Image (cartoon, rainbow, N blue to C red):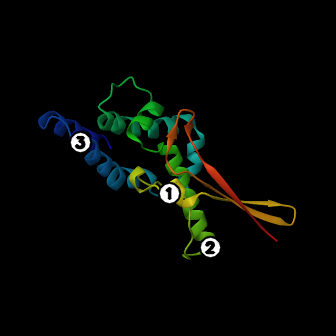
Amino acid sequence: MRKTNTQLIKSDELTWGIKHEAIATIYKGAILPLLTYGAPVWIEAMNFEHNRQKYIRVQGLINIRMAKAFRTTSSEALCMLTGMTTILIKVEEETAHYKIKQKFGHRNIEWDCDVEIQNWPHPAEFGTIHEVVGNEKTSIQVYTDGSKQEQGVGSGAVIFKKK
């Protein structure tokens, strides 16, 4: 880890800085897999504060380079600035994925994962809310035409009852 960070610092000085996207690619493709390797085996070690601090420190060093921030910036703020998930959450996520695969095999199982902002679905495409009241099932579709008025953006709703 220290060697990788040293190389990032050297290249930072020589080329007027590596772009945020390049550092993010290095972090996601090389550093994060190293940090989470074997997580299900040693996840219990994260119960100790000194182990958690070591991981947070490694991620903080990378995030400082990515955000071009001061060393005194908190790790939570750095994660917000760079858009990276906290390393402790990533370790827990890897452990959960491993346990799911062990329990259910390698079937197609959908779970939440990071999605780049530009790939987020448009809210109008997924605006159906299903609500169950007793034996009655209803669905509400909320929509807007995007027009803006003095009070804000208007919206409408259609309620469908199914029996």
Residue drawn at the location 56% of the way across and 46% of the way down: 45
Classify 88 as above or below 135: above
Q: Which mark is residue 138?
A: none
Amino acid type at circle 1 is: Cys
How far across and down, in percent of the image, does residue 128 sit? 63, 60
Q: Secondary structure at mark 1?
A: loop
How far across and down, in percent of the image, does residue 39 sit? 51, 55
Q: Which mark is residue 19?
A: 3
| Nearer to the camera, 92 or 68 | 68
| Nearer to the camera, 161 or 88 | 161
How far across and down, in percent of the image, does residue 125 sit? 53, 60
* Residue 136 occupies quadrant: bottom right
How far across and down, in percent of the image, does residue 158 sit? 68, 58
Amino acid type at circle 3 is: Lys
Q: Is residue 53 left or right of residue 136?
A: left
Q: Residues within 10 Å of mark 3 (few under 14, many from 20)?
A: some
Residue drawn at the location 36% of the way across and 37% of the way down: 63
Residue located beneath label 1 in the image: 113
Residue drawn at the location 52% of the way across and 44% of the way down: 88
| Nearer to the camera, 52 or 153 | 153
**Which of the marked residues, 2 or 3, is nearer the chain's N terminus?**
3
**Which of the marked residues, 1 or 2, is nearer the chain's N terminus?**
2
Q: Secondary structure at mark 2?
A: helix
Q: CA distance from mark 1 to mark 2?
A: 18 Å
Classify 107 as above or below 154: below
Q: Residues within 10 Å of mark 1 (few under 14, many from 20)?
A: few
Q: Is residue 136 left or right of residue 57?
A: right
Q: CA distance from mark 1 to mark 3?
A: 24 Å
Residue located beneath label 2 in the image: 104
